[in-house]
Image: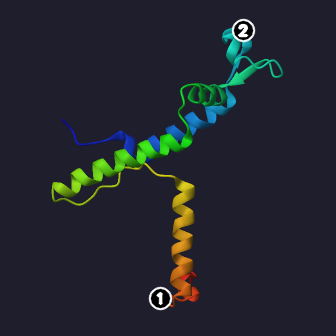
Amino acid sequence: MSDFDFTKTESWALLENFRRVLEDCLVVHNSALPENLRDQVRKGRTIKRLNELCDARDGLTEHKKLKAIKAANIERYAKQAEDGGAIAYDGHRDENKQYKNEMTLVSAMISGGLIEADDLEEE
């Protein structure tokens, strides 16, 4: 069996982005929806909104989803650390949060005198 994992490739990331865009574009007409999911104003709902409604119905919030991802990451990283190998990053992350954290770190490094702002400029 190959160690190749398609979910860790750039192609997978592009497909996931495409899926998210499609969820926001595709509309299911009310005639195909149960009464409790119909939208009388727009005469249909996007796939994205239907997923949000189903998550709310099932009690699955964004907070719970993030906690589940964090728990899975911690478990996976702990297992990798026990095996004595390097911890391999698997791609489960919040891009916006990572960007904000990186910017905060760099700002703190500049404020603390560890680096100069001029060091960050490209030549």
> Quick check: 89 left or right of 26?
left
> Quick check: 64 left or right of 90?
right
Query: x and y percent of residue 88 in the render?
Result: 29, 55
Direction right: furthest residue: 41
Q: Badge 2, how many Cα within 10 Å: few under 14, some, many 20+?
A: few
The vertical placement of 8 against 107, above or below, is above
How are the residues colored? rainbow
Image quarter hosting the N terminus: top left
Query: x and y percent of residue 53 in the render?
Result: 63, 27
Q: Is residue 110 visible?
A: yes
Q: CA distance from mark 2 to mark 1?
A: 62 Å
Q: Which mark is residue 114?
A: 1
Q: Amino acid at mark 1?
A: Leu
Q: Secondary structure at mark 1?
A: loop
Q: Amino acid at mark 2?
A: Ser
Direction left: furthest residue: 83
Q: In percent of the image, x 51 and y 74: which residue is there?
A: 105
Q: In percent of the image, x 81 and y 17: which residue is there?
A: 40
Direction top: furthest residue: 31
Q: In percent of the image, x 74 and y 19: which residue is there?
A: 44
Which mark is first along the chain, 1 or 2? 2
Query: x and y percent of residue 73 in the render?
Result: 35, 49
In the foreground, 26 or 70: 70
Q: Is residue 11 visible?
A: no
Image quarter hosting the C terminus: bottom right
